[in-house]
Amino acid sequence: MEIAWLIPAFPLVGFLLLVLIGRRLGEPVAGWLATIASAGAFIATVITFFSLRGESDHAKRFELVEGFTWINAGDFVVDVGLLLDPLSITMSLFITGIGTLIHLYSIGYMHGDKNFSKFFIYLNLFIASMLLLVLGDNLLLTFLGWEGVGACSYLLISFWFTDEANASAGKKAFVTNRIGDFGFMLAAFFVFVELGSINYDDILSRSSEIDGTVGPFSTSTVIVLLFMLAAAGKSAQLPLYVWLPDAMAGPTPVSALIHAATMVTSGVFLLTRLNPILAEADTWAVGSIAWIGALTGLFAATAAVAQTDIKKVLAYSTVSQLGYLFLAVGIGAYVPALFHMITHAFFKALLFLGSGSVIHGLHDEQDMRRMGGVKKYMPITAFTFIIGWLAIAGVPPFSGFWSKDEILLYAWNADSVGGKGLWAIGLVTALLTAFYMTRQVILTFYGRTRFFDATPEEIKQAWQNRAAKPAESLALMEADRTSIVETMTASQNDIDKYEALLGSPDAPDDLEKLLEKARSINAKARSAIENVTNARDKAAEVANKLEKEMATAIPTTHTVTALSAEPDITAIEEHLPQSYRDRQEYHPHESPWTMTAPLVILAVLATFGGVLNLPFSKDLHFLDHWIEPSLFGNAFHPKFTGSSQIGLAVVAITVGLVGLFAAYQMYYKGKANPDAVEKDILLNAWGLDSSYAAFMGGPGRALFDLMAWFDRTIVDGVVNGIGFVLTKLGSLLKYTQPGYVRSYALGIGAGTVLVAAWFIGRLFI
Amino acid sequence: MSEMLLPSLILIPLATAAIIAVVPSFFDKQPEKTEGFYLPFSGLIALAGSSLTGLVSFYVLAEFVVGEGGFQFTSTTPWVDSVGLSWAFGVDGISLFMVVLTGLLFPIALITTSAHHDSKAYHVWLMMLMAGSMGAFVALDLLVFFLFFEIVLVPMYFLIGGWGHGNRIYASMKFFLYTMAASALMLVGIVSLVWLTSGADGPSFDYRVLLEAVTADGFAAENETALTFIFLSFALAFSVKVPVFPIHTWLPDAHTEAPTSGSVILAGVLLKLGTYGFLRFGVGLFRDQIETFAPLFLTLGVIGIVYGAAVATMQKDLKRLVAYSSVAHMGFIVLGIFALNSQGLQGAVLQMVNHGLSTGALFILVGWVYERRHTRQIAELGGLQKSAPILAAVFTLVMLSSIGLPGLNGFAGEFLILLGTFQSGRWWAVVAVSGVILAALYMLWAYQRSFHGPADGENAEMKDLRPYELAGILPLLFLIVALGVYPRPVLDRIEPSVEALLQTTEERPERPGVEGIVAAAEEAEEHGDDDYGEDSHSEDSGDDSHAEDKDESHSDEDQSDEEPADDEASEKVDQ
């Protein structure tokens, strides 16, 4: 099936073309070229999909397309070839499908950006790398894609590099992922040492030959743990999740494509691809994947509850949903994992693009506390976002319900790794998911539009402006009073001096006159002082009052609900800064069709995505049947009765509705104060990230500094020390070089004798 | 004709140096201020000479027969017959790419950098440096190798001392004395080795003859102590040159203070003399000692990787940071060599090429930044991507190559080295892989501080790359991508030589323990003596008559194992 080469070739050619002529094509042609390249890949994938489906013999749905040898050294040979099987083609379908939609969306979103064409260079390179990751027929080619998407992620997060925060976030993403790569590389080495090959063909068919041990563990267990580390990096699981919330610094289409729908699923893909190795490993190792996933899911959901940035909520939500995927893979529920991966790609891409549309429409506002009522300005965005919300909150019949429910159902039955516990954690996560997503929808789309409100900073500024005048007049009066007091004192001094002189012989002639003048000045000042003091006290009173008013009127950090009232600005209206006035001129607007069209398509997919794998009868398990050849019978198939299935579904629906209702009561009806849940510790995600940063900035940095100091002072110090000693010795040795021939001759003679003695001596030994 | 190819690699730059030296410096007036591409007359001659040398090296590459592990383009001109000295030259897959790298980097260094004063002398030294480097890589006579190995110090000393920055006198002196002192003992080692191996045909400094002698039956075991001392004398010289931790501190000083061209050549070519020496003479002649000392050098290599990266992270000077990254990268190469298997060795040779390309390019880029901003202090840079987007894009590409991103050149070599190390010493590999994390840390952090963020003051006005500069570095960028996507052209040529190197010693039963003897006896019983001998013959394509004679003369089991080794050696001499 050579046509499969077109799948990665399209975006690769698009990338090369854009590198060469992208700048000249400019906006929007460069964007369209990239979109067409991605669409071409999608069409090629669809054709490959149908020809693979047309193969009735399941064993043949596993095809290798040979390319060329990439690296060869001794018995280590790596080919560039494609592995076409249901797993890789399913991944490719949604990568290229959603990828194309996001390319289209970006044409609108990136409108007017100076580096418009550069953005699409990276986007096409990303698609190509991602496709190599899933389609590659060996571990190293997957690693090529793995690092390629990481590099694109780095370049795109720091796309607006003039902001230090973006630059740091990009670097953090790359470095954190490298920690995962450490695991990937070592795992690949183990696989090669055990099997003599890193081709998937060999790994999947001969995984049972991995029989070595590493210390107390079996090699397959160690391999799984190392790949788990790699996957935890890419798929943002504990403890390596920290880069993903920061990655939201990138342009929103990037967040949707890379940091929600595709790249972050590659860890889950890798573990699914290697399911025969997971089957060989110890249960506890594989089970730990599930537990990491469950705990990450809960952890991130609690953090999502308190976020105020619209994208941060979605970022933590992504971490949380990826936790479900890990949970599923860890219990062998590969199909539910893949199912949820696909539906999540639909609704999370939809939500991210929707949030991007809101941000775009509100002139780059990302704080939900400053949104509200956006529904009336952006009806399409709002409508599609609401569908995404219902899907992720697990409301039937939207797609998220079916896939999440299946994971929970499998977890309930996974007794060997503590399935009931996993199920319970998953359920709490579902509750929180419904809660924070409802909160997000209410704060963004319902209630009063808080966008035009004066911000706390503006109000503070206004109060300061208002207080400026009274303070100024107070200062003036104070100065007046001071000068009058001075005059008074001076004239009094004069009076005293002149009075002492009265009658003395050396008194000047005009003493009388002078005394008169001083007295009159003094009298005037005395009469004025009272008025001035009164006026000053009044001014001070006014200023003090303003100060007090200001202290109570300036809002501090605040929680917001749909009912939150407009801050009272009547007292300071004319003092508000220009930014406030400018904002009143803005008109929030719906986004252009290039942005809304992808939203509508994704909304349709998010609604009906569930049909991929409906639970009602075996015939409706399309995904189950389709993926089967890629799983080699390693998938977990729990036995459960219809009634328990229905019972669990009812519990899940109820829990979702409870979360939804609670948020509705709190944020829409105002029945409870949001301060109860929006805690600072949740906002900071339990302080994990900041403690990493503190460690790296503290002891970590100190250690590195110590090494640099060691190099400069000790290692190099020894060298310089030896140099110094030798110089000194050299100047001593100069006395041995007197320049007299006879002393040299003596030396030569003595040396010869010694050497000769040594040779002769050797003869006897 | 083909006999003159390799000598011409030395003679052309030497002649160029001579021509520049006799052309009056009158032609070399420096213009007041240059905006575009400018080379003084001496520079033009140097460019022509080095380009011609480069072309010859490419011709050698094109004509090199793929699949043969022995030396090619060999030529021998007797020098001092009585002591077995000769001008013997030849290249195999290992030295081939060092020659090509040298032929490539010199013209590029000439285009991308310029001397600010006294350009005539500058170009003379550069050409002498080129001649010396080429000589060291193609020499097959140990004393000739040593001469070239030492002679390159002189032009580099003058380049750093004469055209360097700030603390250049200290740096050049340190560089010269450090490396000179370390290699002095190697001369003693070479002479001792020749003396030890001197047989009926008299002494010889020819590598091929020596190789045959040291791999001869029983030689290594008889002379174990002597060989160990001789090896140590070689190892010290090479270790300083690489440089291996903790004898590396001449490098950051030399790199930082050297002019850009000096840094490019130092990183790209001169450091490779150390690892090349280990590969050619260490692994070749001292296999037992290499194995004995492998744990030590693996450890030092790993320390170099992690320590070099950690120290690089904290550097405040961009050029010094790149210099320390070199320490880390050279640590990888040492690791690959002492892994002593085909992945490790091939990775090491490939990485020698890659490091020359990436680090050479990095030094050029840092040089350009310095030329424009007159500072290399990272703290004083910032936001350069805004004022110089093309420079930033080139820097990004080279940086990603340097941190080993798959798809770019640095990856394949690094991966092969780590894979090779993992097979022979798992825990060293585990620590070394963590160097991959650190590499990303120090490079990306430095890039962020220099190129990202807001630009102000002079940073906002920095000029982007001029067309000729971009053209000058383009060959490096092309190779960075091309060798990442398709490293086979290099690997295919390295492989036979590396295999030959491993074979010469692998098939020799060094100091077989009890198990080894038992195993060999059992094997012999199983196959039958004659069978085994014939098998090994059918694999060898060289002329067999010579080997067959030998085969008949040997009859005991141990020696029959050795046959392919002898074949290999004799084949090489025949070529």
Image (cartoon, grey):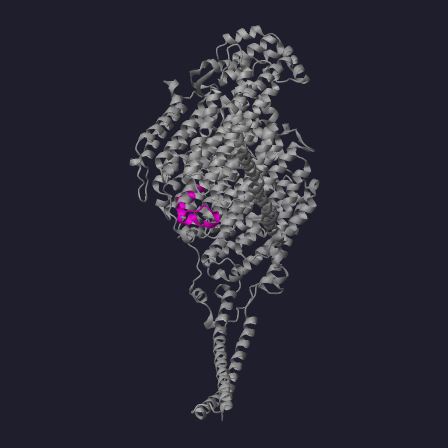
Between A728 and A253, the one nearer to me in the picture: A728
- Asked where in the image residue B369 lies, by quadrant, the reply is top left
Q: Is residue B379 magenta?
A: yes
Q: Residue furthest left?
A: B27
- Quarter placement of the C terminus of chain A: top right
Q: Residue at x 48, y 10 (%)?
A: B543
Magenta extent: B372-395
Q: Position of residue B219 (x, y in %)?
A: 59, 15
Q: Residue B480, image x and y in percent?
A: 44, 35
Specify the principal SS of the magenta part. helix
Nearer to us in this view, B257 or B243: B257
Q: Decide if residue B114 is on the left or right side of residue A501.
A: left
Q: Looking at this view, is B313 or A594 the one in front?
A: B313
Classify B57 as above or below B552. Answer: below
Q: Is residue A670 left or right of residue A99?
A: right
Look at the picture and state if A348 lies above or below A484: above
- Give x and y (percent) for residue A560: 56, 63
Residue A481 seen from this side: yes
Queried whether the magenta region covers residue A110, the answer comes back as no
Q: Position of residue A736 (x, y in %)?
A: 54, 29
Q: Nearer the viewer, residue A273 or B39?
A: B39
Q: Is residue A53 visible?
A: no
For the point 38% across and 23% down, which residue is it? B8
